[in-house]
Amino acid sequence: MVTDILAFCAAAEHELPRSALEVLACARQVADAWGEARVRAVLFGNNVASHAQTLIAHGADQVLTVNHPRLTSQAAEPMLGVLEQLARAERPAAVLLPNDLLGGEITPRLAWRLDSGAVTDCIGVEPGRSPDEVRWVRPTHGGKAVARMTIIGPIQIATVRSRAFEPRPADPARAGEVVASAIDVKALPNNVTVVDEVTHESEGIPLEQAQIIVSGGRGMGDAKEFVHLRKLADLLGGAVAGSRAAADAGWVSHDQLVGQTGKIVAPKVYLAVGISGAPQHMSGIISAKSIVAINTDEEAPIFKAAHLGVVGDWREVLPAFTAACEQLRGGG
Amino acid sequence: MHIVVCVKQIINPDTPAHLFQLDPQTKKQIRGSQPLVISIFDEIAVEVALQFRDKDKSATVSALSLGETEAGETLHHAQGMGAGPAFLLSDPAFADLDAFGRAHVLAAALRKIGETTPVDLVLCGQQAGDVELGVTGPYLAEALGWPMVALASNIVPASEGRIRFTRPREGGYAVLEAPLPCVATITNDQSNVPRYPSILGIRKAMKTQLPVWAAADLSLDRNLLAPEAARLNLTAIETARRESHCEFIPGQSAKEKGEHLAQRMRELKLI
């Protein structure tokens, strides 16, 4: 019998989230370690079958499309129902999901129904050679510890942290089959309904997608000072964020909060300006590739995690830094 | 409307990294001199329940905690904020349960609470501030067989037998509706910053007898408390090692350091 690994993917008609490719990369890593295993992407959405070839190019052996207007980004319950039916009928060895709104709800509920355990927010996996040897690697205690966990039960169910797995390069020559699911989505329970959706004018790039994040903390002193961070972020093509202190003071919106009670980010560069580096903030940035800190206090904890540091007042450092960046950019 | 908020007591999550230690035997954090606190998202869940009761005085907000005797302090904290009845689940048999076993105990307690006053809504923080698994709320929904709403930030009244929640999302929010009874996990936004507990409220709570329930007080299959019932095994845990070689940028003045920083970042291909 072929061992199946299901990789969850919820997409919109014109947008396949990067997280789907990251989940695929994790599934592929596990499948290749086990050998004789097949990665099946389960593609949820409405009119999303056009993404199937992309999923195959990025590592899926089969794409199972579950197409229905009900399958929006807020509809965890019917997706849970589909995965439960699939798992009961076809006994896959593992189901992997992104650690987001949908994955966070579906994963534990699916595990409960299938009498298995669930591990969330994995940053790595040690697949071993078979399903009973897998060890899931995840941060705990705000990133101060790393745990290795095993699931006891008939199926491995886990979510993977955003940006922890690099999508595999697309290989247009990869072959795979596309199959439409026969599950009747309309017949599945859906107790929770969306009665309203409100969108504000949002500023710039979402933090999860930003390669460069310019972030300000208590040391910024005032909301109006964030204009300097915005200017730099615009110049570098990045996004503006803030610490808990900045969010509590109302200097940045909740969407921009980074840390344990905000967003977990993993940009290429995280530039922390006037941020001391409280543990609850650090837990949000442990996956940043490079942390650059500007702070007047050379003893600030942020420097313990930073790769590059400037001890000095941002009011003097930042204008010079921004001007130099402008020049470097201008000079190519 | 009877809302029960599940609250967990944890070791101060803001323990600085250099004081963070793990016990190699138990694989748990060593408390040291750190205070025990209410897990942040659970405190926010209490706030969300209280904001609903501020508008609907007929609502009851209860608090439920599974932990050691000290977890009574966390319940007093919730009561000091304004919660009414509180219930503590404490038994040496609960000490080493995984999230799956803990959810069974909490669900049994919720059923018992419901025998006196039917429970309409169960709130859980989105994840505990220590192990950060985020599975308790969804597990309770399954154990109770109730619908759930994930990552809500506020409760909004709805028609009889139903409830609405706001759920923040990128650049806005959604309003969701579910039938009662249901379970919701709670996340934070600008509107639900927890109020401070009142000292008077905490004193008053400390004077009342806190019901403490052990396994024998609950209608609970004892097999679920056995080590073999666990669904997760923590095989190893270690302190995260951080490569902390901060390269400090030299310069005669702050301005010069700023310029040097840009040059260094360009050399490293960071910008």
Image: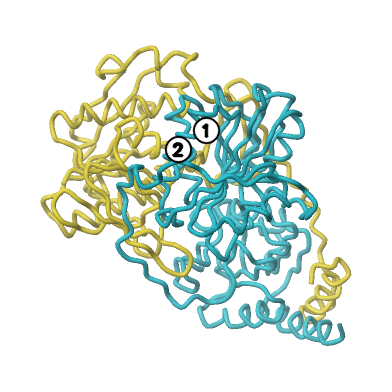
Q: State which chain is coloured cyan.
A: A
Q: State which chain is coloured yellow.
A: B
Would you place residue A60 above or below residue A51 in this image?
above
For the image shown, how many numbered marks are present on the structure? 2
Give the secondary structure at mark 1: strand
Would you place residue B235 above or below residue A19 in this image?
above
Q: Position of residue A328 (x, y in %)?
A: 84, 82
Query: In percent of the image, x 34 and y 43: which residue is there?
Result: A187
Give the quadrant of residue A327: bottom right
Callouts 1 and 2 close, C-beta under 8 Å: yes
Label number found at residue B243? none
Tag 1: amino acid: Ala
What residue is pinned by disc 2? B135
Q: Position of residue B261 (x, y in %)?
A: 81, 73
Query: In percent of the image, x 22 and y 44: which residue is there?
Result: B3
Disc 2: host chain: B
Give the secondary structure at mark 2: loop
Q: Residues within 10 Å of mark 2 (few under 14, many from 20)?
A: many
Label number found at residue A118? 1
| Quadrant in the picture for the C terminus of chain B | bottom right
Q: Position of residue A200 (x, y in %)?
A: 42, 75
